[in-house]
Amino acid sequence: MNYLTATKNKKYLMYISQNYSYAILRPLQAQILAHGGEVRWFLAGNEVDSKFLTTDEQRLNTIKNVKNWAPDITFIPGNIVPSFIPGKKVAVFHGFNSEKRSSEGNRGHFTIRGCYDLYCTQGPNTTERFKELAKQHGFFKVTETGWSTLDPLFSETLNNPYVSNDPRPTLLICSTFSRKLSLAPKLYEQIKQFSEAGKWRILMQFHPKMPTEWVAKYKVLSNENLTFIETDNVLPLLQAADVMLCDTSSVLLMFLLLRKPVVTFCNQKPQPHLLDITDAEEVENAVTHALSKPADLMKNIEAYCQELHPYTDGQSSKRVLNATNEFLQNDEKLKPKPLNIVRNFKMRKELNYWGW
């Protein structure tokens, strides 16, 4: 059933704490505005920068402002949101289940923190688990919608600054920030050699929490063969590259959804849709092999994508908005969420808010 028309005159809050959340929520914001709803942004903590807000995006500066505005829905890409934020709380996720650690039981991607009323899941391989958890806990609902941040991934980016007429293959190197999992400290010499050899056009982008010393060290490698990029929107980078070199960062999953191969270095859980290596000396050959797009690898990538995120129509934001409006309109009776007394006290302290 179509609940998009129910958007009109409703209020939707974007509650964010990291800069990458802007790109996650903007496709959803576009759908809300197109269907007559109102949007405001609340920036929680000191790791999100207001400079990324555009001139036509409206910010609420205090919790009091948020409560006075009284949103019907609060969208959260992060893991937690305080209970004193008004509106039904909808989890839209900040990444895929990259399995950096065990996700069995209530750990990892499937941790239930008692914050949300509705989870909008990305694909079958997470929906099934969340629905099991919904039955177990009883205080939230789950609807599979696809991930709103990927809508622009499946349409051409106009004037993509990373697309080049350079005839060389484009290698995108991405890394997570954990020293244990990151390729940055382990492949520096190889990447330095690649930047000097010029066999590929190299784009580099790190997780925003990457230690500054490694960011600085790789920036120095920038030349006509390697470009180090800091951005709050990785999608144009993914579209511009032919192959990715990564570790266990969830960004590799978005790249796979473009049906492009990924070489991983010491991935936590290597599977047939990845070309995983554990020896730094094997990187060059692995990238060359990936660029040939071997048939068995591409078949495995396709099968995995159907489980991870089968939607390639660029309409996930519409499905999220429709599911949210349906949830709000039906006003389903769920069990009360946990009080989360300790967590909410900590968040009151962090946000310096002691009112009701």
Image (cartoon, rainbow, N blue to C red):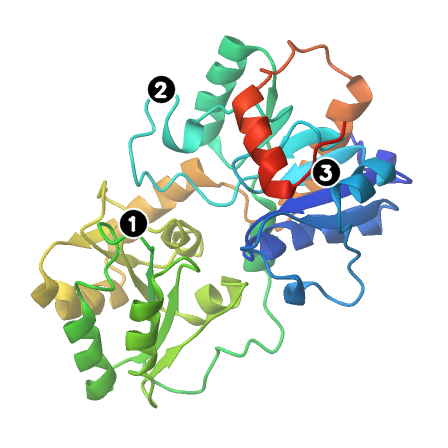
Q: Which residue is mark 1?
A: 248
Which three-letter amino acid code belongs to the residue tagged 1?
Thr
In-front residue for pair 277/311: 277
In-front residue for pair 130/156: 130
Determine the residue positioned at 25% across, 64% down. Answer: 184
Answer left or right for 99 relative to 118: left
Position of the C terminus, as image quadrant, is top right
Compared to residue 255, the image places residue 114 above or below, namely above
Percent x, y of residue 308? 43, 39
Residue 234 circle label = none
Q: Quadrant of residue 96?
A: top left
Determine the residue positioned at 33% across, 89% down. Answer: 223
Q: CA distance from mark 3 to mark 1?
A: 30 Å
* SS under mark 2: loop
Badge 3: residue crowd in 10 Å (few <14, some 14–19, many ≥20)? many
Q: Which residue is mark 2?
A: 105
Q: Confirm whether residue 125 shows in the render.
A: no
